[in-house]
Amino acid sequence: MSAQALDQHTYLPQAVEGVGLAEVVGFLDAHERRCGDRVEPPYLLVGAGEHDQVELPAEVHAALEQVVAALQAGRAVTVAPQATMLTTQQAADLLAVSRPTVRAG
């Protein structure tokens, strides 16, 4: 994965309308009706080759569901990778509060 893949990027709903978003939404909805919140059987990311596949971790599946739901609702989605450890300023920005408020907690 390139370093550019770790940059923040915003995806706009109109940019994905023509690429089968409704099919993805329908697929995820049907699976949820059948299985509830369980991610079973596991979802697979499939490539062109017969054995070119990998199981999606539950966290990736959850992120996919959230992104698809937001795009379907006409909302933009920003993917902004964060370090596991945040500075007090990063935490404040994420929580939309001042840095002193984070430090006081």
Image (tube, helix red, strand yellow):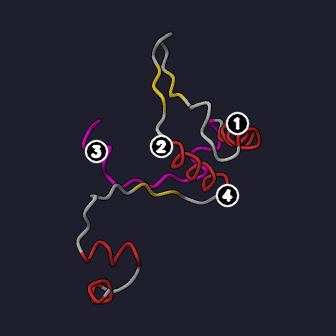
| Numbered disc in front, either 1 or 3 | 1
User: Along the line of sight, which residue is nearer the eye, 49 or 62?
Assistant: 62
Q: Which residue is mark 4?
A: 73
Residue behind mark 1: 27
- Observer-nearest of 30 and 48: 30
Residue at the disc numbered 3: 4
Quick one: label 2 or label 1, which is nearer the N terminus? 1
Q: Are marks 2 and 3 in contact (CB under 8 Å)?
A: no
What is the three-letter code of the residue carrying label 4?
Ala
Please tell me whether mark 1 sits on a helix, a strand or a loop: helix
Where does the image place residue 33, in percent across and percent down from the top left?
A: 76, 43
User: What amino acid type is highlighted by mark number 1?
Assistant: Phe
If you read the primary sequence from the N terminus, does the residue marked by circle 2 or circle 3 appear first? 3
Cα distance between the residues tagged 2 and 1: 16 Å
Mark seen at residue 1: none
Q: Residue at x 35, y 75 (%)?
A: 93
Q: What span is colored magenta in the figure?
A: 1-19
- Work out whether mark 1 precedes mark 4 in sequence or the reverse, and give the earlier one: 1
Q: What distance separates the C-alpha of mark 4 from that of mark 2? A: 20 Å
Q: How many marks?
A: 4
Q: Are marks 1 and 4 in contact (CB under 8 Å)?
A: no
Q: Earlier in the sequence, mark 4 or mark 3?
A: 3
Q: CA distance from mark 2 to mark 3?
A: 19 Å
Mark sitting earlier along the chain (1/3): 3
**Residue 47 image offset from top left, x and y in percent:** 48, 20
Considering the image in quadrants, where does the N terminus appear? top left
- Contact between marks 1 and 3 (CB within 8 A): the answer is no
Specify the amino acid type for callout 2.
Val
Query: Which label was assigned to residue 60?
Result: 2
In the structure shown, which secondary structural element does the residue marked by tag 3 occupy?
A: helix
Q: Mark 1: give few (<14), some (14-19) or many (20+) Cα within 10 Å.
A: few
Judge left or right: residue 11 versus residue 9: right
